[in-house]
């Protein structure tokens, strides 16, 4: 019987083990559940499925594994060898998802780097009515102050005695609670709220899942089915007590915005289980993530947020100025977030009537166009999921929408971690920057298909055809082989065209990588990726220094101090074998080995 996760990777793990153990000819039953709730597990065992029905899902996963291996191992070697041939050091990892993701960040950073801010001018008017003042704005911007002044003069705005109210519209608006969390949505929200990395959020959610207080975290949907809604409804009072909030009139009917079984495939949205945690027994991080999910789930039982939106059009010599205001009628689900989210409400507007005459005062405001924001891990996850929206090609856009972008809910966090480990990106104050190494690779691959997110989307589309038995593994892998061969023939010319550029970057990076002088042979000690090592290794010098010691990452300053002074300043955060933290200096002894020097008590 197979009882792994109910998705293509879970199916692959089980089938690969069965095949290797020589049991593939035996009758196989499949437990297909997406919850660790006792009732759901029992129901699953009572309705075991024919294992053969999921064979195409295994073939889909196996095909993806082989394709990723073929692309990764061949293209990583291809680009690395040509980089090294042109003076670069280290490995240049290339992959089906990681490379388009890196290129996505690179494009955003280049857009910011080359952005030229331009001034603009806006025209406002403050209107004075007997019931109060209100501000209106003319809809268009002006490139120059001269254009704005010319507009005012042409329309004789400053010569007008009064303005006139031409239209008043009051419209009731309803804003429903946000959709339930998928993994990407949870990661994005946690990054914005707590600055957690995507990988950290997944790790915390996984721990809560293993404690049986949170549903399966690697979910790609925002919906639940009727069984899940029923158990949430029956346990609502317990959830409210745990959250310390109340709902006066719970909405207990299924709302298609949240409850739609047709949109639930392998896993439903991330929600609390029937098992409630004792919040005093979980870590601070676990509590933060659990409460995010709990409040998002409780919100679907609250009323919508209801308000009146008032729009007033006021004309000065037939030039319209528009004013918008908001009057709150029903706080609804926003009551749950009173401590966490502050609304930026539109101003309240005075009561006016069409044809009312009002005094006015014109005002000019200057602004500047702003570049796009740097990606954070949260916004990058969203960009990966919705990457098709920015594409011009309609077919690629449709495929990416169907496949939900590049990567999967389960792999996007690990892709970002891979880019960090490969030294392609760095994160400072939550903003993601591409390193010099990452920029060089992006410039080289800019014209290659591997940089295009549309390519990986087309792959995912065909992989789904394998699952539905409308495509074959042989046909897909044949196209992958042809793609790899195409790049093997194309890439050398790319390097030839950019040879001088690579040499310049190689020289600069070599200089940046020098940590100091080797205490054994006086050659340079350089960053070699996993360790700092002597550049004279070809002449027999094996001197190295680690990047981590007793589970503490050593800074470049620590390494430079060891090379120049044979000791560091006091370093906090080392861990003993028993797991306790301690502080010490690191020294380099006569045998060129690291040793601790503890502060005197």
Image (cartoon, rainbow, N blue to C red):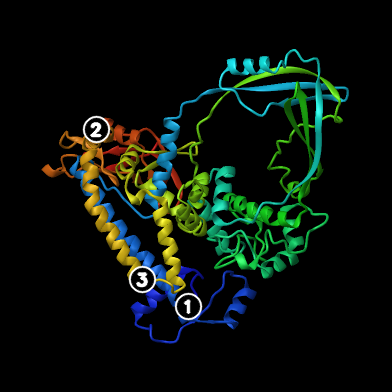
Residue found at x 40% / y 56%? 456
Q: Residue 287, percent across and down?
A: 62, 52
Q: Residue 442, percent across and down?
A: 34, 42
Q: CA distance from mark 2 to mark 1?
A: 55 Å
The residue tagged 2 is 504
Label 1, secondary structure: give it: loop
The residue tagged 3 is 473
Q: CA distance from mark 1 to mark 3?
A: 23 Å
Q: Is residue 133 left or right of residue 591?
A: right
Q: Which numbered circle lies on residue 183?
A: none
Of the 4 image quadrants, the one containing the C terminus is top left
Q: Nearer the viewer, mark 1 or mark 3?
A: 3
Q: Residue 461, percent across and down?
A: 44, 62
**Vertically, is 340 above or below 354?**
below
The residue tagged 1 is 2
Label 3, secondary structure: give it: helix
């Amino acid at each position: 019987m197979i009882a792994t996760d109910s998705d293509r990777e879970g199916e692959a793990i089980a089938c690969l083990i069965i095949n290797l153990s020589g049991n593939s000819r035996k009758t196989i039953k499949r437990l297909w559940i997406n919850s660790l709730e006792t009732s759901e597990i029992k129901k699953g065992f009572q309705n075991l499925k024919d294992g053969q029905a999921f064979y195409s899902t295994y073939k889909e996963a196996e095909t993806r594994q082989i394709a990723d291996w073929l692309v990764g191992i061949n293209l990583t070697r291809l680009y690395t060898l040509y980089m090294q041939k042109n003076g670069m050091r280290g490995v240049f990892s290339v992959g089906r998802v990681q490379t388009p993701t890196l290129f996505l960040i690179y494009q955003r950073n280049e857009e910011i780097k080359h952005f030229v801010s331009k001034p603009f001018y806006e025209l406002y008017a403050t209107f004075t009515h007997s019931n109060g003042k209100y501000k209106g704005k003319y809809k268009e911007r002006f490139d120059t102050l001269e254009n704005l002044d010319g507009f005012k003069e042409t329309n004789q705005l400053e010569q007008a005695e009064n303005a006139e109210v031409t239209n008043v519209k009051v419209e009731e608006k309803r804003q429903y609670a946000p959709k339930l969390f998928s993994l990407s949505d949870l990661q994005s929200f946690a990054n914005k709220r707590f600055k957690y990395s995507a990988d950290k959020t997944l790790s915390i959610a996984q721990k809560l899942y293993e404690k049986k207080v949170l549903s399966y975290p690697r979910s790609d949907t925002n919906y639940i089915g009727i069984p899940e809604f029923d158990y949430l409804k029956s346990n609502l009072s317990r959830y409210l007590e745990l959250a310390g909030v109340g709902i006066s009139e719970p909405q207990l009917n299924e709302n298609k915005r949240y409850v739609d079984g047709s949109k639930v495939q392998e896993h439903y949205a991330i929600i609390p289980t029937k098992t409630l945690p004792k919040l005093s027994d979980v870590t601070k991080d676990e509590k933060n993530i659990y409460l995010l999910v709990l409040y998002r789930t409780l919100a679907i039982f609250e009323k919508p947020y209801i308000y009146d939106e008032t729009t007033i059009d006021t004309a000065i010599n037939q030039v319209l100025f528009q004013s918008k205001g908001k009057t709150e009628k029903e706080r609804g689900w926003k009551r749950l977030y009173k401590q966490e989210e502050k609304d930026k409400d539109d101003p309240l507007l005075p009561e006016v009537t069409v044809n009312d005459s009002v005094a006015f005062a014109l005002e000019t405001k200057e602004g500047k166009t702003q570049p796009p924001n740097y990606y954070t891990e949260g916004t990058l996850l969203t960009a990966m999921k919705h990457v098709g929206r920015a594409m011009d090609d309609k077919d690629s856009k449709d495929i990416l929408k169907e496949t939900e972008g590049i990567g999967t809910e389960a792999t996007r966090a690990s892709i970002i971690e891979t880019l960090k480990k490969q030294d392609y990106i760095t994160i400072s104050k939550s903003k993601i920057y591409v390193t010099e190494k990452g920029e060089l690779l992006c410039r080289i691959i800019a014209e290659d298909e591997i940089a295009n997110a549309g390519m990986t989307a087309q792959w995912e589309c065909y992989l789904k055809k394998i699952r539905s038995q409308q495509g074959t593994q042989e046909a897909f892998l044949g196209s992958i082989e042809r793609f790899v061969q195409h790049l093997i023939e194309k890439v050398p010319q790319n390097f030839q065209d950019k040879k001088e550029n690579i040499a310049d970057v190689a020289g600069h990076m070599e200089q940046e990588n020098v940590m100091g002088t080797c205490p054994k042979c006086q050659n340079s000690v350089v960053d070699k990726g996993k360790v700092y090592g002597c550049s004279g290794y070809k002449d027999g010098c094996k001197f190295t220094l680690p990047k981590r010691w007793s589970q503490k990452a050593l800074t470049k300053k620590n390494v430079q101090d060891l090379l120049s002074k044979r000791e560091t300043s006091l370093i906090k955060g080392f861990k003993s074998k028993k797991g306790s933290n301690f502080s010490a200096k690191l020294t380099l002894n006569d045998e060129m080995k690291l040793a601790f020097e503890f502060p005197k008590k």
